[in-house]
Amino acid sequence: MKEFNRLIDNQLKTMDKLLLLQSEIERCQDIEKQLLDLQEESEAVTIQEEIQLKKQELKCIHDMFERQTEEVIRYFQQGQAAIR
């Protein structure tokens, strides 16, 4: 059971990272919109680059979360098989 709790704990930490990064992306997109409204295109390009980097990071974290989910499912299934 300790292992299962550890897996879930890791997954929750990853979910926190996902949520934080998503909120950062939204904040950057708001800044981007404001810059474009002010016709500050050179600064908008910089924030667009930051958004792209954050989206790449988000994808990596999302992939990690999926792998963790698969690991939790495998562990749970092994435990269920051992009970039978």
Image: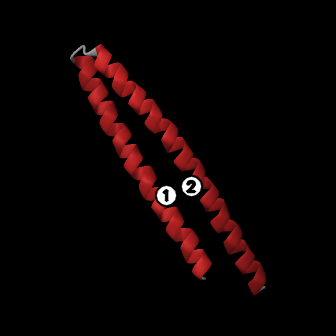
Q: Decide if residue 11 is on the left or right side of residue 30.
A: right
Question: Mark 2 is on which residue type?
Answer: Phe
Residue 1 against residue 40 in the figure, above or below: below
Label 2: how many residues lie within 10 Å, few (<14), some (14-19) or many (20+)? Answer: many
Residue at 30% x, 14% y is 41
Residue at 55% x, 73% y is 6
Residue at 68% x, 72% y is 75
Residue 38 against residue 56 in the figure, above or below: above
Q: In x, y percent, where is residue 72?
A: 63, 67
- Labels 2 and 1 touching (C-beta < 8 A): yes
Residue 48 against residue 6 in the figure, above or below: above
Secondary structure found at label 1: helix
- Residue that numbered label 2 is attached to: 65
Cα separation between marks 2 and 1: 6 Å
- Residue that numbered label 1 is attached to: 14
Q: In x, y percent, where is residue 66?
A: 61, 54
